[in-house]
Every structure is written in C-alpha cells, then in structure tokens.
Amino acid sequence: MKLGFIFREATKGLGRNLTMTIAMIITTAIAVGLVVAGIMVTNLTKDTKEIYLDRVEVMVQLNEDISAGDPDCATPACADLQEQLDSDESVESVEYRNRAESYERFKELFQDTDPVMVEQTSPDALPAAFHVRLKDPEDASAIDAIRDNPAVEDVVDQQQEVRDAASNLDSIRNATFVLAIVMSVAAIFLVANMVQIAAFHRTRETEIMRMVGASRWMTQAPFVLEAVLASLIGVVLGGAGIFLGKSQVVDPSLQGLYESQLLAPMKTGDLWIALPLVGLLALVVTALTAHITLRSYVRK
C-alpha cells in the first residue's frame, strides 16, 4: 500500500512539474548518450589500433649505392644488414625490394587514387628498402640497432602513423567525455531544482502527513522516485538515440571503411554493455542528489 502511494505521488509529480521534468529528461538523455558514445569510441580506437598494428611494417630505406647497383641484395653492405635483421629474435620477417620493385609497388598503390603523382614520379626516385615486420610492433630494438648503419638512408616507422590516426580518435573521445561531464553537472542541478520545486508545492501535504505520523522516508520517497523516474526515461531515450544514430547514420556512413578494414566497426555489443552500467550510475546519482537536496533544504 505504501509503495503504491509513493509510486502514484511520484507519477503525479512528473505531470505537475512538466517543463522541469522534460528539461531533466532531455539533459539526462544527452549526458548518458555522450558517455556511452565515448565508451564506444574508446573501444573502436583500441580495435582500430589492433587492426593496423597487425599490418604495420618498418621500412628501412637503403642508400643510393645499394638502390642503384644492387638489385639482389648481394653486396656485403646489403647482405650483412639483411642477415642482422633476420637473426634478431624480435623480427618476424624481412622482405627486400629493389628500386624497380619499390616503384612497381608504388604504382600499384597509387595508380587509381593519384595517377598524376604516379606519372610525375620517376622510377629512379624510390630507394631499395627492407620491409620489416616485427613480432611486437612496439619493440623497435632491432630497428634502433641498424639506424646508424652506413647502408641505411632512412627509417619509416608506420607505427607512428597509427599513433597519429589513433590520436585523432582519442581527441573525439575526449571531447565527447568533456561534453558528457558538462551535461551531467547540468542534470544534477536540474534534479536539485526539480526536487526543491516539487517539495515547495507540496509543503502543506507533507506537513499534514507528518502530523498524522508519516515517517520522513514516507514523505520524501515520492520526490526521490519522481526524479529517478524522470532520469530513467532519459536513460532509455539516450540509449535509443545512440542505437538509432549508430544503425541509421554512423554504420551506413562508415560501411566502406569497415569493409576495407581502415576502421574497426563500432560494436553494438559495446552499447548493450555500456548502457546498463551508465544508466544505473545515472539513476544512483539522481537518487543521491534528490536525497541530499531533501535533507539539506526540506526540514519538515
């Protein structure tokens, strides 16, 4: 009976403070949606880095003498360098490409995307190089050991490119979390204001209930539940918004990148894991905010 009364009073309160309730629902939905989106982008970044780290190579470009006169890596300078890389336990594989093979690979990669650049690039412009695959892409000790070798002209580490790409995704994630924090603070203040206004409008009812013996819990519970119900609606709307945005906007827009494995797909499973946890946290924070507000401002 008491629980039924508390629930009825809470649902009535949502209608009494309609504009405040709507504002809180919208703010909560945005805050929850941003936090969940931030978590999903975090996982997307991690999965994308794994995709690229599985393919990442270190290109050891060789000097002009080897590039111009050693198509088979037969000279001592080239052969010794290859042997040193092959014998290193941290190296998974080493592939030698002479100048002609490097140019053919260059044409293969850019003929369709930038034919003008291919046309303007001389076959002698690209050096011979070792393409080194490391067992652990973050362990570059084998490459560090040969950087000062006279046969080495330059070292191109693709891992840095992966870090730069991941940094851009991290920036999007960080911006999302900052906005989520701002909206969460706004939601907390709305909860406090909503509870104070609701308690003010029902001061007389509360006084009468206390006079006839109702406990403090009995008089304050409807206000707390009112705030929690509004927050719950916001959580549901926020989750629905993220799901629809992902399925109707994000996934169709990025489908090409997913298929070409240039970007890891944003997983729906991450949504179903993150949303309940973030939603539960939002409800707990709402209940605590409402309770603390009542204890601080409502003395009756």
Image (cartoon, rainbow, N blue to C red):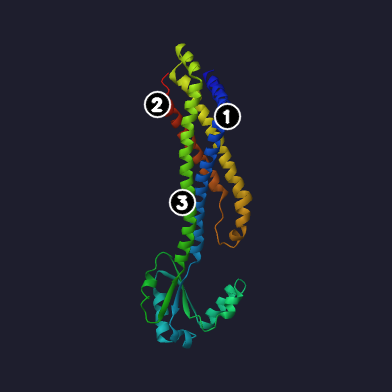
Look at the numbered disc 1 and give the secondary structure of its residue. helix
Labelled pair 1, 3 in contact (Cβ < 8 Å): no
Real-space Cα distance between discs 2 and 3?
34 Å
Residue marked by disc 3: 174
Is tag 1's residue or tag 3's residue first in the polypeptide sequence? 1
Q: Along the polypeptide, which appears first: circle 2 or circle 1?
A: 1
Q: Quadrant of the C terminus?
A: top left
* Crowdedness near tag 2: few (<14), some (14–19) or many (≥20) residues, C-alpha within 10 Å: few
Q: What amino acid is at disc 2?
A: Ser
Report the residue marked by disc 2. 296
Q: Nearer the viewer, residue 18 or 94?
A: 18
Mark 2 to mark 1 CA distance (whole Å): 24 Å
- How many angstroms separate mark 1 from mark 3 (CA)? 33 Å
Residue 42 in view (yes/no): no
Which one is closest to the eye, mark 1 or mark 3?
Answer: 1
Residue of label 1: 18
Rendered location of residue 254, percent (x, y): 60, 57
Q: Please provide percent x and percent y for residue 156.
A: 45, 72
> Is 44 on the left-hand or right-hand side of 80?
right
Q: Position of residue 113 (x, y in %)?
A: 60, 71
76 shown above or below 4: below
- Above or below for 120 versus 260: below
Q: Quadrant of the N terminus?
A: top right
**Badge 1 amino acid:** Leu
Task: Give amino acid for label 3.
Answer: Asn
Residue 264 vertical position relative to residue 203 in the rendered view, above or below: below
